[in-house]
Image (tube, rainbow, N blue to C red):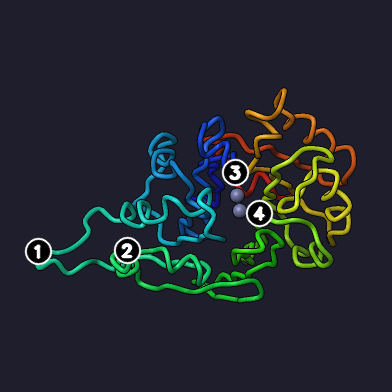
Amino acid sequence: MEDEIVILGSGGGRHHIRTQHRATGGILFKFNGIQAHIDPGPGAIVRLNQYHEDPTKTEMFIVTHVHIDHFNDLSAIIESSRESLHDKKYDYFRKGILLTTNETLRYVSDYHLNMLEKVVPFKAGDIFHYKGVKIIGTKVLHSPKNEGFGVKFNLQDYSIAFSSDTMVFDGFSEQFSGANILILNLLRPDSVTCKRHLCTDEVIPYLNKLEPCLDALIITHFGSYMDGPRSERNHVPSQVKKFKEKTKIKKVIPAEDGLKIKISDLLNK
Ligand SMILES: [Zn+2]
Ligand SMILES: [Zn+2]
């Protein structure tokens, strides 16, 4: 299995939850032969099937916070990650590892938690080693009411970070330094600011502070002002153009539902 990203949903926020104008299934990240599902929002299990991915291969589940566009299908994908649930004596098989906030864990049934091999309460600043990969929790400034984190994977040949939902803040750039690839949740275009999310104009100076420069930026988790009920048009192409003009990042890729990207195609040669 070659390292790969599969976009199971390029939408974020409540309008896309309702309309599915852009899907909300999160992201599959395949690395070192491990399949991780990050932020399985509503429809994640539908999108896995629609895009011909195999839910039984998932062994790592990551939910960055309990907002429903990140959390909704978690139990469905845990249950779908094995072909049979239990043996003839009704002893449930344990498989997989879940990294999520303590808060999120309160909303997962014991029935599903007991299907997992390991549950790791996770937060910004935490470090977890899994099969030779260093997984680091990054800080988010998002909901004042919910715990959350972003996540960075340091592998032997590259480093990749998933910002999760966040605003920019002092230290935003530093925590992603050394990353080759950043998957950025970009809910809003241009200078359409928001108290919980970042927009293009706000984040560009922070991307320019990244040392060394990213090889690739993938923008995703687009909100309704970006493309949907509250935007007159799809603003994604103009944002890609802006990132290309105003940063030195060579590859800027807009997420689309069902898009599959090989990691080797993202890294500078
Ligand atoms: Zn979100
Ligand atoms: Zn959120």
Residue at 56% x, 75% y is 128
- Above or below residue 1? Residue 139 is below
**Amino acid tagged 1:** Lys
Find out if the beta carbon at label 4 lies less than 8 Å from the nearest ligand 2 atom: yes
Give the residue at mark 3. Answer: 13
Mark 3 → mark 1, Cα distance in angstroms: 42 Å
**Amino acid tagged 2:** His
Viewer-closest of 23 and 133: 23
Give the residue at mark 2. Answer: 112
CB atoms of marks 2 and 4 within 8 Å: no
Mark 1 → mark 4, Cα distance in angstroms: 43 Å
Residue at 72% x, 51% y is 197
Numbered badge on residue 165: 4
**Amino acid tagged 4:** Asp
- N-terminal label among 3 and 2: 3
| Residue 83 in the image, given as x and y percentages of width and height | 25, 53
Left or right, 62 with reference to 119? right
Helix, strand or loop at disc 4? loop
Give the residue at mark 1. Answer: 88
Find out if the beta carbon at label 2 lies less than 8 Å from the nearest ligand 2 atom: no
Mark 4 → mark 3, Cα distance in angstroms: 10 Å
Find out if the beta carbon at label 3 lies less than 8 Å from the nearest ligand 1 atom: yes
The residue sitting at the top extreme is: 232
Of the residues tagged 3 and 1, which is closer to the observer?
3
| Residue 41 in the image, given as x and y percentages of width and height | 49, 48
Helix, strand or loop at disc 2? helix
